[in-house]
Image (tube, rainbow, N blue to C red):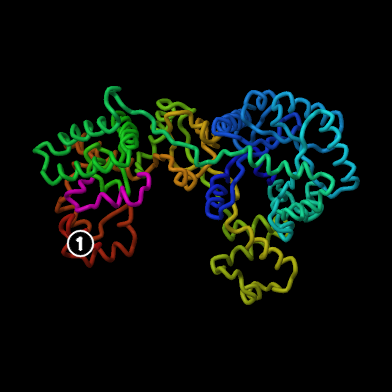
Amino acid sequence: MKRGQDQQVTGIVCAHEAAKETGVRLIVGCRLDLRCGMSVLVYPTDRPAWSRLCRLLSIGKARAGKGACHLDWPDLQAHAEGLLAILIPDTAGDTCGLRLRRLRDTFSDRAYLALTLRRRPNDQMRLHELSNLAAGLGVATVITNDVLFHVPDRRILQDVVTAIRHTTTVDALGFRRERNADRYVKAPSEMVRLFPRYPEALARTQQIADRCRFSLDELRYQYPEERDDPALTPQQTLEALTWEGTEDRYPEGLPDSVRATLHHELRLIARLDYAPYFLTVNSIVRFARSRGILCQGRGSAANSAVCYVLGITSIDPGRNDLLFERFISEERREPPDIDVDFEHERREEVIQWVYKTYGRSHAALTAVVIRYRSKGALRDVGKALGLPQDLIRAISGQIWSWGEEGITDDQIRELGLNPGDRRLRLLLDLAAQLRGAPRHLSQHPGGFVLTHDRLDDLVPIEPAAMADRQIIEWDKDDIDALKFMKVDILALGMLTCMRRGLDLIAAHKGIRYDLATVPAEDPRTYAMIRKADMRGGPMQASAMSCWMRRTSSLSCLRDSRTHIR
C-alpha cells in the first residue's frame, strides 16, 4: 500500500469492480498511522466492522482538516470490534513490545505482528527477534510484502511520485527514496523462497483472508425519508403530490394524453422503487422556490411529466414529444439522475439547507478524482527530476500535438532539443506512465449523497477545502457502481440574470412570470433570433449566429426544434 494512500479508502470501489471482472477476491482494509507513531493495518471482518472503520476515519479527518487524518490509540481502541489488526513494526524493542501488548489486549486473537523484509543489514536477525517477541506475548505473526508497485520497473516512477508528494526532487529525497526495487507484487512461490523459516506465518495470510469476508456488495443504500404523512408510503406521497401539481400546471384541465403519461411514469417509478428519490429532489426544489430562488431541472429529467408537474422542470414533455424512457428505463436499471440548476449567487443557501435538514452525518458532496493529463504529468515529473523550468515549459507547450504515441522525435528536434538525451527521454517515458493516474481529490460542483442511515456508516467523510462543506472519499463513478443516490445541486449564472429580468418585468409591467409561464411563442423574440440579435448562452456563438441569420422561417418553438433536428 502506498504511503500516499494511507488512512483512506478512496480507490477501494475501483479495486472492487476490477476484482469482480477478474475473479480475484478483494480483501478490504487500510493502513492507519497513529499520532503516537504506531502503524497498523486494519481489515473489517463483517459489515458492522466496515461501518466502524468508516466512522473511525471520519473522526480522524474531521479532527485534522482537509487532506490529513489524526488518530490516536484510544480512537482505534473504541472502534476495534470486528476489525482485524496487524502491527507494522520497525525493530523488536521496548516500544514495539508495548504496542504489541496493547494490540493483543484490545484485539485478542484478531491481533497480528507483520514480518516484512526490508532488504537492510541484519534483516534476518530482525525478523527472528520480532518472531520471538510475538511468541512471548502470545501474538501470531503474518508475512506481509508491503507492496508499492506491481512490477520492479515501476520503482523509478515510485521515486518520482514520492518526490512530487514531498514537493522536492528525486536527488533530494534522501532516506525517503526506496533503496531497491523489491517492493513489488510477488508470486506465492517467491514468498515461500524468501521466508523459509516462517511457514506458519506465511500460511496465516490465507487464514486472514478467510476471516475477512466483508465485501462492498453488502452495502445497501437507503433513501432519506420525505413523507409529510407517516401513514403514506413514499410512492403514495409522490402520487398525491403529482396529482396536486397538475392543478397548477394545467389550470384549464388535465389533458387525457398527459394523464396517461403520468400513470405510465408513476407505474414505472413504483416498479423501480424510485419514489423516495423524486421526493428528495422535490423537497430541495420546494425549499428554493419558497425562498424565491430560481431553479430549473436540466438534462433528461425534462422528459418526465412527473418532474414537470412537481415543478422540478419547466418544460411540458407532452407538448414537446419527449420520451420518458430516455430518463428512466426498466431495461437499463440505472438510478435516476436529476441535475438541478440554481441561481449561482444563492446556491450556497440551498447547500447549507441540505446540511441543516438532513444532518452532516447524512449528507456530503461526492469527490472528484483529479487525474494527470499530459501537461500536468510533464510539469510534475520535470520538477521531480530537477529539470530546468524553461525546458519543462517548452515540452509541455507542445502537448496539443501529443497523441497516443507520444511526442515524436521530429517534434523534439523542432524545439531545438536532442531526442537522444537520456534525461529528456526519461521525462517523456515517466510522464506517459503517469498520465491518467490520480493526482488528488477535489469536490464535485454539487453532487450530494443523502442517506436515511448515517452516511459515515457507508463511506468516510472528510472536510472539504471550502468552509462548511464536507465530501465523501468516493467519486460519482464509485457512487454509480454501488447504486447510491446522488442529487446534483448546481449553479448557473444565467438563472441569476433571468431572475433579475423576471423581477424587472414584475416591477415595471406588473406581470409575474416563472420559467414555465414565459410565453413560448412570442413573435418579437423569434424576430430577434432570426436577426442573431442575442447575448448569452450558445446562441451568442458566431457559428450559431450565422446559422440563425440564414433561418428566415424561424417563427415559433416547433420551428426551432425542426431546424435543429
Location of residue 353 by image quarter: top left
Location of residue 140 by image quarter: top right
Measuring 18% from the left and 34% from the top, which residue is drawn there?
A: 243
Which element is circle 1 on? helix
**x, y (%) of residue 151?**
71, 58
Q: How many marks?
A: 1
Q: Say if residue 62 shows up in the picture.
A: no
Left or right of residue 287, residue 87 in this image:
right
For the C terminus, the image quarter is bottom left
Measuring 41% from the left and 39% from the top, which residue is drawn there?
A: 485
Q: Is residue 527 above or below residue 219?
A: below
Q: Is residue 385 above or below residue 214?
A: below
Location of residue 200 by image quarter: top right
Left or right of residue 208, residue 92 in this image:
right
Q: Residue furthest left?
A: 252
Left or right of residue 193, residue 499 in this image:
left
Measuring 58% from the left and 60% from the top, which residue is drawn there?
A: 374
**x, y (%) of residue 208?**
67, 39
Residue at which label 1 appears? 562
Give the class, few, some or many, for how many residues have Cα within 10 Å of label 1's Cα (few <14, many ≥20): few
237 or 394, which lies in front? 237
Amino acid type for the residue under numbered disc 1: Thr
**x, y (%) of residue 23?**
56, 53
What's the magenta region?
Answer: 315-336
Measuring 58% from the left and 39% from the top, which residue is drawn there?
A: 213
Q: Does 320 appear in magenta?
A: yes
